[in-house]
Image (tube, grey):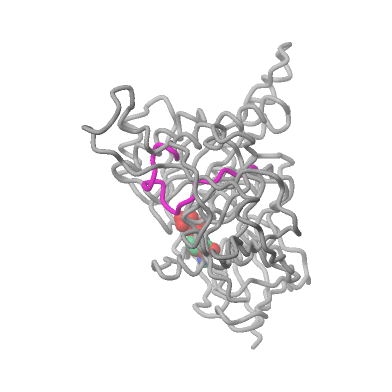
Amino acid sequence: MEHDFTLQQDSELRFEAERDAEDVSLKLLDGKAEIFGTELAPNKQYTFLPGAKVAVFTWHGCRLRLMGKTTGTYIATETPMVMYLNTHGCLERLRRNAERATRSSDEASHARGPICMVVGPGDVGKSTLCRILLNYAVRFGRRPIYVDLDVGQSSLSVPGTLGAVLVERAASVREGFSQEAPLVYSFGDKTPSSNMTLYNILVQKMGSDIHAKMASNKKVSVSGAIINTCGWVMGDGYKSVTHIAQSFEVDLIIVLDQERLYNDLVQDIPFIRVLYLPKSGGVVTRPRNVRATDRDERIRRYFYGLKTKFHPHTFDVKFSHVKIYKIGAPELPASCMPCDMKVDDHRTKIVPVEPGNKVKHCLLALSMATEPADLLTANVMGFICVVDVDESAGVLKVLSPHPKPLPDTLLLLTQTQFIDSA
Ligand code: ADP
């Protein structure tokens, strides 16, 4: 199937690659166009992952050829792209101010560019807006940091993680931003509410890492950071939003699609600029089961790769060769607690886990910590998945992106499960 489309200025072609379609591709025949801020080269064939939801936007008009099985294909003339571009303009002004201040100051420390976070309910286009703003920044020669705190979707590693990466190139149309050497913390679950104390500790740690990175490099410092957040904005979720703003010393909060959240933030934190932006009509809502499938797919890609099929390694590890821990112990009734223990302490308790059937199908994070006491705030080097357990032989069968042996490190148990059907 092949269709040509002519787009007038300020319009976009929206489509969804079918989930079983491997071969959806697009060519820019004439004019200029971009996908979520990444400029398309003329006559180059771009391919898409099965299930991808895409918008090809043009500022000045263009002609496109779309090939393969797609659904929901239409041209939209109403888009919020002008507002998104103006927001980029506002961030760019702050970067220029920082640049000027750095030049005129004798101090060794650099003036800081804008740290901006995007908040709003689920499925309003938060990750997409982050991608657009980061791509525009890179096209202006900036090197911003992308921080993804959305543990449900975790675009920089497996679900259940917080990640950050320095963005040096525009996102690939098919695969998003390059994931070379991201900084990753394992939270271990898909919603912050499962252990708010731990989530806040990791947010705080990530915030101080980002400030340290910015302080060490002038270009990065001036470029600033863009932070993506979870779609959890009510009750404790709201508290989490304000905690992130404090931990990262955010300069600008962009609220997508929820005026109430915008008003609450304007009232509660008057010292931070808050901006309301509408969501794009093209953003696709994903039902719970689709989110779960997307999470599985992300884990599968972590082990099996995207472009060329990786061949992950499966090997046996003796129980005696692994040290597994988890964070968080069951809550004790207040009457049973030692008097010097705080109510929240059980949430950050580091507990050894005996290898056995209960870790089957679980992802284990390879922590950078060498001592159990450091596990709470140490970043991770990667993940393995326990595909099988032989309790009688005392052996775990694991799936790993790297060959045997496992690095001599502590393993952190996560609640994230993956059943390898390959
Ligand atoms: P959130 O981060 O708020 O959950 P996303 O940015 O992940 O939302 O967007 C949800 C889905 O909608 C994504 O698959 C994204 O590719 C798609 N999407 C976003 N903007 C558009 C658009 N303008 N047209 C078509 N699809 C879009």
Q: Is residue 112 left or right of residue 267?
A: right
Q: Is residue 341 visible?
A: yes
x and y percentages locating residue 409 in the rendered image:
66, 43
Image position of 272 with respect to 181: above or below: above
Q: Is residue 206 visible?
A: no
Residue toward you, 398 or 220: 398
x and y percentages locating residue 397 in the rendered image:
62, 64
Magenta stretch: includes residue 12: no
| Quarter of the image where one finds residue 378 | top right
x and y percentages locating residue 414 in the rendered image:
50, 52
Residue at 62% across, 30% down: 113
Residue with the most extreme top position: 106
| Quarter of the image where one finds residue 266 | top left
Residue at 52% across, 36% down: 376
Residue toward you, 358 or 221: 358
Q: Is residue 168 left or right of residue 269?
A: right
Image position of 94 with respect to 170: above or below: above
x and y percentages locating residue 400 in the rendered image:
68, 60
Residue with the most extreme left position: 335
Residue toward you, 257 or 76: 257
Magenta stretch: includes residue 196: yes
Residue toward you, 300 or 283: 300
Residue at 39% across, 42% down: 329
Please tell me how many numbered marks the rendered image carries.
Answer: 0
Residue with the most extreme front position: 392
The image quadrant where one finds the C terminus is bottom right
Q: Is residue 71 left or right of residue 322?
A: left
The image quadrant where one finds the N terminus is bottom right
- Region of the chain picked out in magenta, as a range: 183-198
